[in-house]
Image: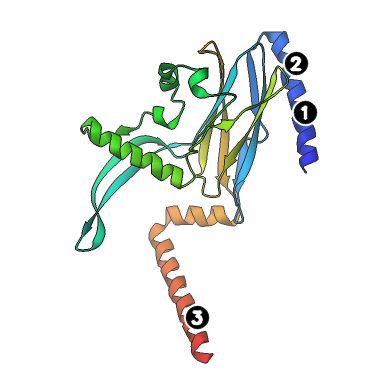
Amino acid sequence: MRIQQSLRLMIALACLSCPLAAHGQALVADLSSHLVAITTGFAGTDVLLFGAVEGPGDVVVVVRGPDQREIVRYKARVAGIFVNRKEMAFSRVPSFYEVAASGELDKIASASERARLEIGSENLRLIPEVERDPATVADYRAALIRNKEAQGLWAPNVAKVTSLGARLFRANLYFPSNVPVGIYQVQVFLFHDGEVRAAQTTPLSISKIGASADIYEFAHRADAAYGAIAIALALAAGWAASAIFRRV
């Protein structure tokens, strides 16, 4: 399987590098697959990004999942029990976020350029739905980033873009088992002297298929019925376990 993948990569890279000289393109990139299929036994997967550049520069890749609303809650101890006391809701939060680069980001692009392009979790424009003082927003923002990293949905470190010769590059993009479904945007930037020389955006679809898709669809369309069935199954499993232990 890996040999076949390597052969496909070599052929694809050769095909990608040809149009650069012919059409004067500075950057061409593609994915080994534009669909990640989540089945019942899905345990995470890698998607290979590969491409070619014309001329010197550094490559930066940003993978961003569909935006969603996130609520960050602050817990406090009340009568010896931790309960939710305060919360802050953010809009336009990427459900998944990963960055890969061929070098150190602070040496590839200036802080203002990274902020403009939202490269790095510290540069994401996370907007609270209710205006609060900057210090409070900063605390909740930091908590949101920690939560996403703990879930494995935001990569805490910059992944590596590997150069293959003077013009070709590749990067392995990892998607964990709990990756949300939806249409992802894979952005590829070519930087030279701190400025963007070329950019390309490629869509990636992550979708549930088979039995897991049917369960997912049922759970979202008939959430009350799904909850009742889940409770009934849990009660039945508990009763069956109790009956078995009584006999033993």
Q: Position of residue 28 (x, y in %)?
A: 65, 19
When asked about the image quadrant of residue 95, the answer is top left
Q: Position of residue 112 (x, y in %)?
A: 40, 17
Q: Residues within 10 Å of mark 2 (few under 14, many from 20)?
A: few
Q: How many marks?
A: 3
- Of residues 3 and 201, the one drawn nearer to the viewer in this rendering: 3
Mark 3, secondary structure of its residue: helix
Query: Which scheme is used to colour this image of the protein?
Result: rainbow
Q: Which amino acid, mark 2?
A: Cys
Mark 1, secondary structure of its residue: helix
Q: CA distance from mark 3 to mark 1?
A: 55 Å
Q: Earlier in the sequence, mark 3 or mark 2?
A: 2
When asked about the image quadrant of residue 141, the answer is top left
Label 1 belongs to which residue?
10
Q: Which amino acid, mark 1?
A: Met
Which residue is depicted at the point 45% across and 21% down? 114
Which residue is depicted at the point 44% across and 46% down? 150
Label 3 belongs to which residue?
241
- Of residues 234 and 44, the one drawn nearer to the viewer in this rendering: 44
Judged left or right of residue 30, residue 236 is left
Q: Quadrant of the N terminus?
A: top right
Q: CA distance from mark 1 to mark 2?
A: 13 Å
Which residue is depicted at the point 29% across and 40% down? 89
Q: Earlier in the sequence, mark 3 or mark 1?
A: 1
Label 2 belongs to which residue?
18
Q: Which amino acid, mark 3?
A: Ala
Mark 2, secondary structure of its residue: helix
Asked whether the residues under the numbered discs 1 and 2 touch, taking CB atoms below 8 Å apart as contact, a structural biologist would say no
